[in-house]
Image: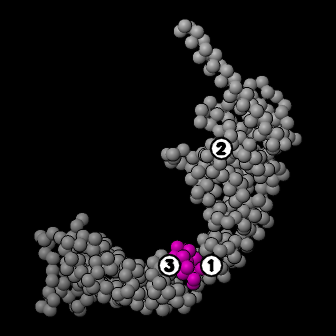
Amino acid sequence: MEALFALLVGGWAVWSFIHENRKRGQRWKDAVASCGFEMVEAPGSFKARAGPVEVQLEGSGDKSRPTQIVVVAPAPPDFQKMVIRPQPALHWVREIEVGDESFDDMFIIDGPVQLVFALLDAETRRLLSNPRFEKQMKISYGEIRAVVTDEKVAEVLRLLLDVCKRFAPPIEVRRRLAENARQDPMPGVRLQNLLLLVRELPGDPATAEALRAACSDSSPEIRLRAAKELGAEGRDVLLELAQSLEVDTVSAEAVSILDRELPFERMTAILDGALSRRRHRTGLACLEAIGRSGATAAVGALSKVMAARESGELAPAAAEALGATGSPAAEPPLIQALQGDRGDLRVAAANALARVGSTAAVLPLKEAAERSLLDLELRRAARQSIAEIQSRVQGASPGQLSLAGTEAGQLSLSETEAGQLSLTEDPAGQLSLPPEERSPWPK
């Protein structure tokens, strides 16, 4: 009885398997027929063809999605080297990013870069991201594959065929890249296509055309990159970006690129706008450019920023820019900054005096360090600045600095040991470092 029962159960299982396979086979036939394909072979799997396009349906080994669809269709050269597959849950490195963040997060992309970017335009990305694929679609070795439930074979097959149409040759790669740089709805994709053209096809007419078109792009970042690559032709765009202050990082880079090409009055106008609108990066770029400008009015403009309370974090940068001017006129405002209550500004002023300071700055530097015994950064900066000033005094030996006994504030060579600083024995302001006293400054 038990043997008979086991035989019946086994027979039922075999019959169910055959019946299910027949049902699946019929669904496959109906699916390919609905897409205009004709069956060409069916030994264990189903193959169908419509012109040059071939479809193969086979078991996937996945119980939840038992059908695998494989489509092979005409494609451009090197398409077999292109790989697009679902991104795993944990991933660290991306091979290629096309600039569409959601698409880049969804897939791992690899292959010939120009071909990849040319093919993955907005419509193709939309098709590949279709939720009906349920993240089970991939492209490799020239084949497009998807794993699906039996009920979805027909609709997923149609989707795959639509993808194949996007890859159908002939593909003019350069034209596609230029079109993507101009027309893609995603700014990141437009930028990546533009950069690819610049990097790999720098002298191509399509690249020049794309750069000129990009100067009118809605994205400030793209306008910046295009204008930068166009050189003198893009100067007006750079000037517009520098003055707009729309995006701080963009305006800052535009200022840095233009640098001395910007008239001094226009540079200070941009700086005023950056200060009022709190565009920190642009403000820094302006200060650096003014410090390098060589303009006679640079010291006054930088001193004003350094002294203004609303300058905030830009005040130390203004002090550094004063040092970069190389002008003797920068010394008085820097010495005054040493006497303030902002630690970061005092350090910046001390560092700047290393470049523009004269012997008149030595005593204020030393006094500033002595007033801030716990500020090691300031003490180091003051010591280094004094050493730099000393090195500019003709004939001085390393470490030998003293205030002469003739007139207060004069610097002369001391006959004492290296590193000693002494004042004249004039009762007014007498100060000395005896030989046996070690300097409290950190080494």
Which residue type does callout 3 highlight? Answer: Thr
In the rendering, at what x and y percent does residue 216 appear? Answer: 69, 76
Magenta segment includes 248:
yes
Reply above or below: 438 against 431: above
| Residue wearing tag 2 | 137
> How far apart are the two marked residues, 2 and 1, measured between alpha carbons?
44 Å
Residue 238's disc is: 1
In the rendering, at what x and y percent does residue 34 appear? Answer: 81, 43
Which of marks 2 and 3 precedes in the sequence?
A: 2
Position of the C terminus by quadrant = bottom left
Find the magenta span and give its range: 241-255
> How far apart are the two marked residues, 1 and 3, measured between alpha carbons?
13 Å
Magenta segment includes 95:
no
Q: Nearer the viewer, residue 219 or 43?
A: 43
Query: Is residue 323 in view?
Result: no
Which residue type does callout 1 highlight? Answer: Leu
Q: Nearer the viewer, residue 162 or 96?
A: 162
Q: Quadrant of residue 33?
A: top right
Which of marks 3 and 1 precedes in the sequence?
A: 1
